[in-house]
Amino acid sequence: MTFKLRHYIMVEDERREKVLSDMGLKIVRFGNDEVVRNLSAVVGKIREQL
C-alpha cells in the first residue's frame, strides 16, 4: 500500500468517525485479528460500552 493510499484511508476514516460522533454515536474499534482470536472478549468490551 502506498503512502498516499494509507493517508487517504486515514483521512477518510477520521471524517467518517467525526460524522458518526456528531450524530451521538460512539466508535469502538477492534482489529480483525482480535475479533477472530478472541470474539468473546470483543463482545464483552462492546457490552461494557452499552
Image (cartoon, rainbow, N blue to C red):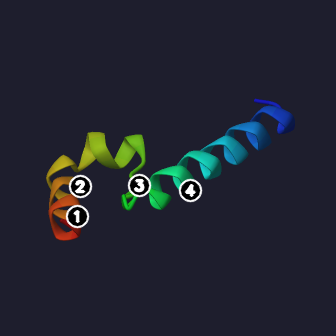
Q: Are marks 4 and 1 in contact (CB under 8 Å)?
A: no
Disc sitting over residue 18 in the figure: 4
- Between the C-alphas of marks 4 and 1, the distance is 22 Å
**SS type, badge 4:** helix
Residue drawn 22% across the image and 64% down it: 45
16 horizontally vs 3: left or right: left
4 horizontally vs 25: left or right: right
Disc sitting over residue 42 in the figure: 2
- Amino acid type at image mark 4: Lys
Q: How many marks?
A: 4
Circle 1 is placed at which residue position? 45
Q: Are marks 1 and 3 in contact (CB under 8 Å)?
A: no
Q: Looking at this rendering, what residue extends furthest in the bottom direction? A: 48
- Amino acid type at image mark 2: Val
- Between the C-alphas of marks 3 and 4, the distance is 14 Å
Q: Nearer the N terminus, badge 2 or badge 4?
A: 4
Question: Quadrant where the C terminus lies?
Answer: bottom left
- Between the C-alphas of marks 1 and 3, the distance is 10 Å
Question: Quadrant where the N terminus lies?
Answer: top right
Q: Nearer the viewer, mark 3 or mark 4?
A: 4
- Between the C-alphas of marks 1 and 2, the distance is 5 Å
Q: Are marks 1 and 2 in contact (CB under 8 Å)?
A: yes
Q: Quadrant of residue 37?
A: top left
Q: Position of residue 29 (x, y in %)?
A: 41, 54
Q: Are marks 3 and 4 in contact (CB under 8 Å)?
A: no
Circle 3 is placed at which residue position? 29
Q: Position of residue 39 (x, y in %)?
A: 20, 47
Q: Nearer the N terminus, badge 3 or badge 4?
A: 4
Q: Nearer the N terminus, badge 1 or badge 3?
A: 3
34 horizontally vs 48: left or right: right
Residue drawn 85% across the image and 35% down it: 4
Q: Within 10 angstroms of label 3, few (less than 14), some, or many (20 or more) residues? A: few
